[in-house]
Image (cartoon, rainbow, N blue to C red):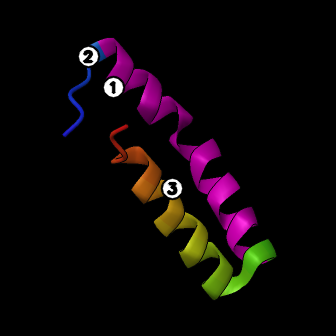
Amino acid sequence: MLELTDARAAALRAARPEIDRSNTELHALLGDGGFGTTAGALRRLAHWEP
């Protein structure tokens, strides 16, 4: 689990509306299946260990 400093947590909260907007646009562009596949691939990359 990612632990953030107070300042970084605040920055993430401030960025949340833009993150949500981007996700909404990607979902509209890719559709349910494409968005789910992309999210799954990003999740696997986030947990990848070389």
At 67% from the left and 66% from the top, the residue drawn is 24
Q: Residues within 10 Å of mark 1 (few under 14, many from 20)?
A: few
Q: Residues within 10 Å of mark 3 (few under 14, many from 20)?
A: few
- Could you say whether the residue bearing mark 3 is in a helix, strand or loop? helix
Q: Is residue 24 above or below residue 43?
A: below
At 60% from the left and 67% from the top, the residue drawn is 38
Q: Quadrant of residue 26?
A: bottom right
Q: Quadrant of the N terminus?
A: top left
Which labelled disc corresponds to residue 48? none
How many numbered discs?
3
**Sequence-first disc among 3 and 2:** 2
Q: Is residue 35 above or below residue 25?
A: below
Q: Is residue 30 left or right of residue 11?
A: right
Q: Position of residue 22 (x, y in %)?
A: 69, 53
50 is within the stretch colored magenta? no
Q: Amino acid at mark 1?
A: Ala
Task: Write down the region rendered in magenta.
Answer: 7-28
Q: What predominant SS class does the magenta segment belong to?
A: helix
Q: CA distance from mark 1 to mark 2?
A: 5 Å
Q: From the image, tell me which residue sits under label 2.
A: 6
Q: Is residue 12 above or below residue 22?
A: above
- Could you say whether the residue bearing mark 2 is in a helix, strand or loop? helix
Tell me whether the residue at label 1 lies in contact with that at label 2, contact meaning CB atoms closer than 8 angstroms. Answer: yes
Going by the picture, which residue comes out furthest to the front? 50
19 is within the stretch colored magenta? yes
- Could you say whether the residue bearing mark 1 is in a helix, strand or loop? helix
Q: Amino acid at mark 2?
A: Asp
Q: Quadrant of the C terminus?
A: top left
Q: Amino acid at mark 3?
A: Leu
Q: From the image, tell me which residue sits under label 3.
A: 42
Q: From the image, tell me which residue sits under label 1.
A: 9
